[in-house]
Amino acid sequence: MSRTTLILLGAGSSSRFKTTVKKQWLYSGDSPLWLQVAEHFERSTDFERIIIVSSKDEIHLMKNFASYHYVEGGSNRQASLSNALKYVDSDYVMVSDIARCCVPADMIKRILDAKEKASCIVPVLPVTDTLYMHNKPIDREQVKIIQTPQLSVTTLLKQALKTETLFTDDSSAIASLGESIHFVEGSSLAHKLTTIDDLKKVPCIKMPSARTLTGFGIDIHAFEDHKEMFLCGERIDVNYGFKAHSDGDVAIHALIDALLGAAGMGDIGELYPDTEESYAGADSKELLRDTVRRIRSFGYTIGNVDLTIMAEAPKLLPYKAQMKKTLASLLGIKANFVNIKATTAEKLGFVGRKEGVTVHAVANLNYYNWKNI
């Protein structure tokens, strides 16, 4: 059996999808869409390797789900495909779009079975409507709707893409070399998810799970004289602040870790390392805004958060109401879903000695319910 590599393309920004969630991160049950697609192809045949092409930020999270080969995408489809082809040495390469999420197994088989018939095997659908071009009708029997996945001879596809010309699919690139194209029957089920309305045309996507994901965060900072103090995004009226690379908002840092923990996205040091000069003196509110943006783009919604601030000093009761409003605004949730508790350490330890503050945070996430769109 000839060796075949599968490349799944998903590095696009989903700009036409018009939601905060990237379409590859819509959840079907407990699986993001990209994973459901990859596992479906994996069950369909024995690929030598499966390569997922996505953005750098997404790859960091994707690795938590499955041990495929991940490649960072480029500025367009062709650049992304070229990046992936660097890791392909099999005889054939099958390329599909993650957005074409309901490709039937028998369609995949038809494509693979025809591999020796041409340099590129392409699934197509007939055109059933009347077509006009330049205000004149054209013979629809001569027109085909091209789909993916497409199977190509690897060496030819690599050669075809060594050009400044941009191709919209693999068959166009292969045809530019004068190589042969063979068409097989496609499927109306293999509809490409491009806009929100397309969700009605992809029956393989199930309702997202109602599972709640919980994360815990903790952070500690010592005091530093003659520095502004910020806590929960609010300036505290004292003549000392927190010793830290950023503004030292220990509460927001703990909250970020709780959110990242619930999403399985690592910790604050991985996303915003204190070794990078760009984060020196950083406004922690901006870090939280960016964390929330990432979490939402990866298919999660924030349920509620709960923080416990352990501090002998300063006294926080006068600030708690505004802290709650500020965090709710940053998180994009109602204030009643934000809870802030303040306690002392009963004069024990570094907190009791008024040397610093520690904060514990819990956050709950749910999968974005795209069924409500």
Image (tube, grey):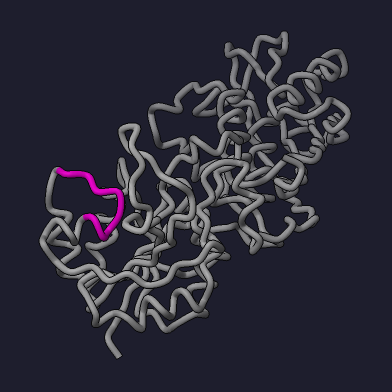
Using the rendered image of the protein, determine whether residue 35 is visible from the camera's viewpoint. Answer: no
Name the quarter where the C terminus is drawn: top right
Question: Is residue 166 covered in magenta?
Answer: yes
Q: Position of residue 149 (x, y in %)?
A: 39, 65
Which segment did they paint magenta? 165-172
Q: Is residue 26 left or right of residue 301?
A: left
**214 or 164, which is in the foreground?**
164
Most common SS among magenta residues? loop
Question: Is residue 170 covered in magenta?
Answer: yes
Q: Quadrant of residue 136?
A: top left
Point 37% across, 40% down: residue: 132
**269 or 315, which is in the foreground?**
269
Name the quarter where the N terminus is drawn: bottom left
Point 25% across, 62% down: residue: 85
Q: Is residue 262 left or right of residue 167?
A: right
- Judge whether 159 appears above or below 165 on screen: below
**16 or 308, which is in the foreground?**
16
Q: Position of residue 225 (x, y in %)?
A: 60, 15
- Judge whether 155 appears above or below 250 on screen: below
